[in-house]
Amino acid sequence: MSQEIELKLLIEPQQRENTLNECRTVAQEHGAESSYQALELANAYFDTSDLRLRQYDMGLRIRQSGDHLEQTIKLAGRVLGGMHERPEYNLDVDSMEPDITLFDETIWPDDFPIYDIQRDLQELFKTDFTRHKWHIPSGEGQIELVLDIGEIRAGDKTERIVEMELELQGGELTDVYRLAERLVKNAGARMGSLSKAARGYLLAGKSALEPFVQTHFVDISADYTLADALYKSLEYGLRHWQHNEACLEHHAHVRAAQGMADGIYLCRSVLDQLQGLNIDCSDLAERMAEIHQSLNWLKRFEGLAELTAEDGAYHRALKKQSSLYEHLQDTQQQVIQLAELVNVVRSNDYQRVLLDLSQFLMVKPTNEALEQPCQNWSTELLRNDWKDVQAAFEEVEDMTEERYLKLLPSLQHSLMLGTCLGQLYDAQQRDSFRSPWLDLARGIREINALHILHEMVKNSDDLADEKLLEWQKVQRESLLTALEYSRKAALRREPYWQQ
């Protein structure tokens, strides 16, 4: 068994020659020209008809290089930024027919149906490429620098492969990231969270790449140290962010942008806590905030979507105002900045943030404060944070729309802290407490939608209509009444961290 620790980088096809020359230059600078190899590799990937290996997050392939055949199983691992860590088992075999019973039986999870899976294995797709490889000295070991150029084939479908792998083989982690930054700068390389196998499953129509549109409670437990809990939360946020970024690249859609925004926001929330614990990450947090700003258009888009959604509260009434409804739809489309977001994702600055965040997570800086148990610290954090939120929402007897809008950011921040740490507490009590506050946050976002509508009608001679303005006023008053009810109900709930 070997434990792969490798950084995957994607290269635009038109950059392949430039990238090959850059790799040669790197090798020359390190006196590693003689380590160069060019290998023709043919790979077949297998799974069952119901994709049971995929369900276990495993990948099975047979690779042919010359006359040599090798069967490989990759087990569940993790991806941090573009850094992939996966246990890998390899066996020499005599044919292209897979046989997973040849592997040591101790590698499988409990109750793994090895013989059922073996009987149903079938080829799903192939990846054939030329592997250009160098070994770059690093510390007491080396970095295997690989450039793969070829294609994925699934039936009559094909997709180009131009990607790099920087595999750490006893060398220095900082050298891997330093080399990756150079490749980002000189070859336009991008971090890659999807493996060749994942792309093959997509091409074969055996999996779908759908945005994650909701963050879930991070899987932490009371026996974690504070470092364990916060870095687990940061990993989760980065995975959420990068999954949605991959969705954006695969098929640009607003839901992918929304998922990216949530992932980035979660990461920023964790970095804020780490800074408060004297971990030096302020530069990273500031650069991440700049990326987050490129998603600010989502707030207006979501307000317009609230007004035009067919299952929304305002659709039926607004649809009767045909010119207004069409104007809302047109404006909603004009607000979308997906092409600009794709350009941000492909920029050097964005890629360096991902590289630095990935390296930060691999190193996991710590100190004495982070070694304390997470439970007490979490309870104290949630108590102090909520004390401020509660005071703000209790300050006046009757809240105005403007005050609700002003308080939304602090409410969202507290709810996100609950996402990071809520798994430490009783689920029923936690969800009962959060439910009215989540309703309140949704209602405040609805206020924003009605404000957009009001300004649109008020400032347009073509759309201005006294009856429509009066209807809006009634809707806003009704919503404000509902918000007041939710606010007072929420304030009566006992916080779950005190029960």
Image (cartoon, rainbow, N blue to C red):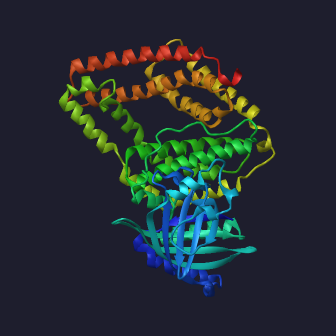
Residue 144 can be seen, yes or no: yes
Q: How many marks?
A: 0
Q: Position of residue 194 (x, y in %)?
A: 50, 58
For the N terminus, the quadrant is: bottom right
Which residue appears at 37% of the width and 15% of the height? 477
Q: Position of residue 306 (x, y in %)?
A: 35, 31
Q: Give above or below for 106 relative to 273.
A: below
Report which quarter residue 272 is drawn in. top right
Q: Which residue lies furthest to the right in this view?
A: 368
Give the camera-side residue of 287 and 239: 239
Q: Give above or below for 75 relative to 430.
A: below
Residue 290 can be seen, yes or no: no
Give the camera-side residue of 327 and 306: 306
Which residue appears at 62% of the width and 52% of the height? 283
Q: Where is residue 220 in the image (x, y as percent from the top left)?
A: 67, 39
| 470 displayed left or right of 106 | left
| 366 displayed left or right of 51 | right
Q: Give above or below for 154 relative to 316.
A: below
Q: Give above or below for 191 relative to 464.
A: below
Q: Residue furthest bottom?
A: 34
Which residue appears at 33% of the width and 66% of the height? 156
Q: Residue furthest top?
A: 397
Which residue appears at 42% of the width and 52% of the height? 248
For the C terminus, the quadrant is: top right
| 367 displayed left or right of 464 | right
Q: Where is residue 196 in the image (x, y as percent from the top left)?
A: 49, 64
